[in-house]
Image: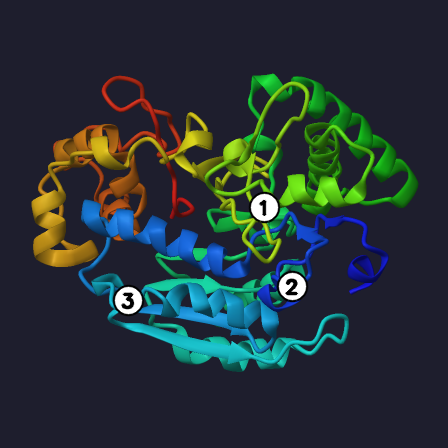
Amino acid sequence: ALANRLKVPFLTGAGAPEALWKAEDRYSFGLLSSLADNGRLIIDFLARLHELGCLDDAPRIAVLYRVAAQGKDFRKGFDEQADLPLLANIAFFPYEWEQFSNELTQERALSILDPIRDFDILIGDGGPVELATFSLAAQQLGISWEIEAWGAGAAISSEWRDGKLFVSWWDERLAFRELELFLAAWDDFQLQYDTEIRTVPTSFSATAYQASITLAYAMDASGSTDPEQWVDALQSITADAPLKHSQAFPVVLPGHQVFFRPDGQNSAPPALIQYECDDDDDANVLLPESDATPGGLGKFFHSCECPWRQSVAAGGNAAPLGSLEDAEECRLQCPALWALNPLYRSEVNARGDSSGGATPRPLLTTIAAGVGVALVFACLL
């Protein structure tokens, strides 16, 4: 590597593939975590929902992944947890991909999705172009899944992201009030970027910023002008001694900390966000729990109890409702279970109140008492 030959530290806001990083490359550091972590984060989230009884005992899960270094890393996150009961009915669907070559055609996307139309959950690996291609194909085939999660691609056009889950290395919703100065600068940067380049900046702009801040921290911590000591300081940023957010050295990434593996790749986990159905830009941060937005589910998993639980366990997502009143009570007490079961919603909306009352209120209403957080997982039917 060039950095090794020059013996100067090299930090980048890109470089997710694990194959790029080697322990012997002492001078190289990357601020993007591995795509294997993206897969692990999705499984972590689904496992929590599984524990709550929101999913069938063994839902059919389809995983699309690229036949490339990124896709192999993404699949690794699932293979490492293959013994989970949740993954008993998981199937993998590789697809050819070559960056900038438009390898994934619409015809190819249709042929890939057709065999998985009856799966319960779709998990995809790919960027905005791949996600848009698959989303259009799903629309043409009339396919929808109970949950659709993507390991990347949150920058996709709003027409394709409604209700979907995305793993993201950075999102401005991750910022808390101590980052107001950064967000103000980010807003100015977005405006200038859009004016000059006619598009919005990606999350790589934020991770590049973090790379600069991390290097500045290492220079300061070393108290030296010797690049070798800067590298020593960077190598000391580990899981046991992470770089944590401070006013002097802000950390804008998920969890607001950075720590490197021995090979120099950032090992701090990414975030899971979910766009709502009726707003072009409204989204919730779900994980990590430390960053969960008020409308997210990150601090909700272990406090959610719902009278549906026994019914869901007995009959799966298609279990019948007892009454509209019971459904409304569940919607208020456990919006995550309500939102995850579109069959319940369609039944109640089609049936209405048998006593002649009004139909249920809009499901995007945020609850207040008792729970304090709400999550909508699928677009209203």
Label 2: which secondary element: loop
Above or below, 311 against 334 in this view is: below
Which residue position holds label 3? 87
Say which mark, if any, is on residue 24. 2
Disc 3 to disc 2, how far (Cα)? 36 Å
Label 3: which secondary element: helix
Amino acid type, mark 3: Leu
Q: Is residue 373 left or right of residue 133?
A: left
Q: Is residue 11 in sight in this rendering?
A: yes
Q: Residue at x 25, y 62 (%)?
A: 86
Q: Residue at x 92, y 40 (%)?
A: 196
Crowdedness near tag 1: few (<14), some (14–19) or many (≥20) residues, C-alpha within 10 Å: many
Which residue position holds label 1? 169
Residue 209: x %, y % from top left: 74, 37
Say which mark, if any, is on residue 88. none
Amino acid type, mark 2: Glu
> Which residue is more in the foreground, 286 or 312?
286
Residue 270: x %, y % from top left: 52, 46
Label 1: which secondary element: loop
Residue 87: x %, y % from top left: 28, 66
Q: Is residue 5 left or right of residue 272?
A: right
Above or below, 29 against 195 in this view is: below
Above or below, 112 against 163 in this view is: below
Q: Residue at x 40, y 48 (%)?
A: 378
